[in-house]
Image: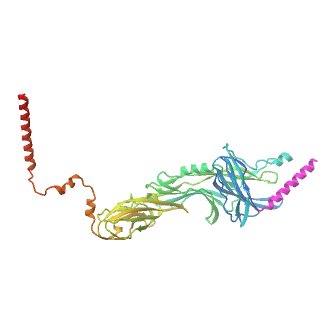
Amino acid sequence: MKGKLVLSFITIFLGFCAVGFSQNIRIVLGPDNIALNQAFTISVEVQNDRIKNMGNFPEIPGFQRAGQSSSSSTNIINGQYSMSQSVIQNYLPQQEGTFQISPFTINVNGEAINSPGKKVTVGPPIQQRQHDPFAYDPFEDFFGRREPQEFIDVSEDAYLALSVDKNEVYVGEGFTATLGLYVAVTNEAEMQWPSDISEQLAEIKKKLTPANCWEENFKISDLNAESVEVNSKRYRKYNLFQAEYYPLNNEQVNFPTLTFNMIKYKVAKNPSFFSRTRQADKKEFTTRPKTVRVKNLPEHPLKNQVPVGKYRLNEVISSEKLSTGQSFTYDFTVQGEGNISAITNPIIRTSPDFDFYPPNVQQSINRANGKVTGSKSYSYYGIPNEPGQFDLGDYISMVYFDPDKEKYDTLRSNFTIVAIGESKKNVTISSNDLGSFYDIIDIESNDLRAINQGGIIRTAANILIVILLGLTVFLLIKK
């Protein structure tokens, strides 16, 4: 009876495996219950083929994407060759509770693969520990204990590198630093993102950020792979961190050695259906230190004030023809690649011909494709005081340093203002409150008076005071 039961169980199990293998592509959802400090996963698995193209994983309310990982395996069992590849998307829960994953579809190799979704319950945080999902073999208890499985290490074809797009820059000139994990397309070692990836990347950022630089962080949220070629070899590159740095002085920028740990699996020496096929281990990747030299800007009266970058001017004016005393608006917008935040106000030449009021300032910064671009706009309110024709470029401009051309350049307005009417200089003077002294000019006499007139008045006043004092003494004595 027991033998029949065993035979039936094996038959059912093998039938189940056959059904499983008949599915070439499938979506696998993570467990129903996880802790707040654990990641939920959605995996796309392809049997006997490779993932050539694939759509996006869904968004899950209450979860944040935490990067992707991929794995592949090749098995030869009883002379039968099989291979599989999977892509795993990690999601980090933001709070405790029960969350509904709606049904979704992912296009894989041109085929629409559906998932019914599920409910996921997020509980309190638990103490993390390394867990190998293949550590337990139910058939060992069923058939009796076997000899311990031997695992061998498969050498990984991958490396961690910190790269910069420029090895030498001027003070204020930006350069991009990228920390990337490169995995060869031909890599056979199976690796996975660790559960503490957020903590590792936070620590890396602390070590990576130079003290003498302004940073514009690209804030990578998804660890998606891009195909690159290094020394005629194809790699999948995962950008772990990327930022644009702008040196604030001429001290060289030094980046230290960085480390990043991945989960790497050893494989069973004699794999079978009835034993675990892999064993989790830790693999530490390190980078080489990197240095970027910083040069002083060429001599210039404004070299410590000018912005550095590749800029152009975009300007808008409300009207080029107006009357004296009539206001106009003028937008001086600097656009291009560089440290947009460091752009200073344009130079306004003081002149009685115009009145310019302090501008309203707006800026926009874009961080994409390894570059920082944007714009900074100065909106002026001006009034012409004199009639005539005026080149606005003579009154407003901005000096900057172009690191590609290695020279200073100036952005000037191309507008010409034509003002008609009478001069408004006197109107401008009369519009100011000059005090009570000027208020009595119109009622005072224009007759000339002697310069020593003040002395005569003082003498008469002194005599009058003496007489009053004498009169006071006389009255006191008489009483």
Q: What's the residue at 13%, 58% (across, down)?
A: 446
Please tell me which residue lies in front, 193 or 67.
67
Above-or-below relation of 395 to 475: below
Please tell me which residue lies in front, 108 or 388.
388
Name the quadrant containing residue 57. Answer: bottom right
Report the quarter where the C terminus lies. top left
Name the quadrant containing residue 458. Answer: top left
Locate residue 261, reporting x and y percent: 63, 51
Please tell me which residue lies in front, 232 or 378.
378
Position of 93 with respect to 385 (left or right) is: right
Locate residue 283, reporting x and y percent: 66, 51
Locate residue 332, reporting x and y percent: 41, 64
Name the quadrant containing residue 431. Answer: bottom left
Q: Which secondary structure class fits the magenta region best?
A: helix
**Residue placed farthest to the front in the image?**
479
For the question of whether residue 343 can be seen, the reply is no
**Residue placed farthest to the right in the image?**
1
Residue 15 in the magenta stretch? The answer is: yes
Position of 305 with respect to 145 (left or right) is: left
Q: Which residues are magenta?
A: 1-24
Locate residue 149, reporting x and y percent: 79, 49
Query: Which color scheme did the rendering employ for the protein?
Result: rainbow
The number of discs equals: 0
For the question of whether residue 286 can be seen, the reply is yes
Residue 52 in the magenta stretch? The answer is: no
Above-or-below relation of 136 to 380: above
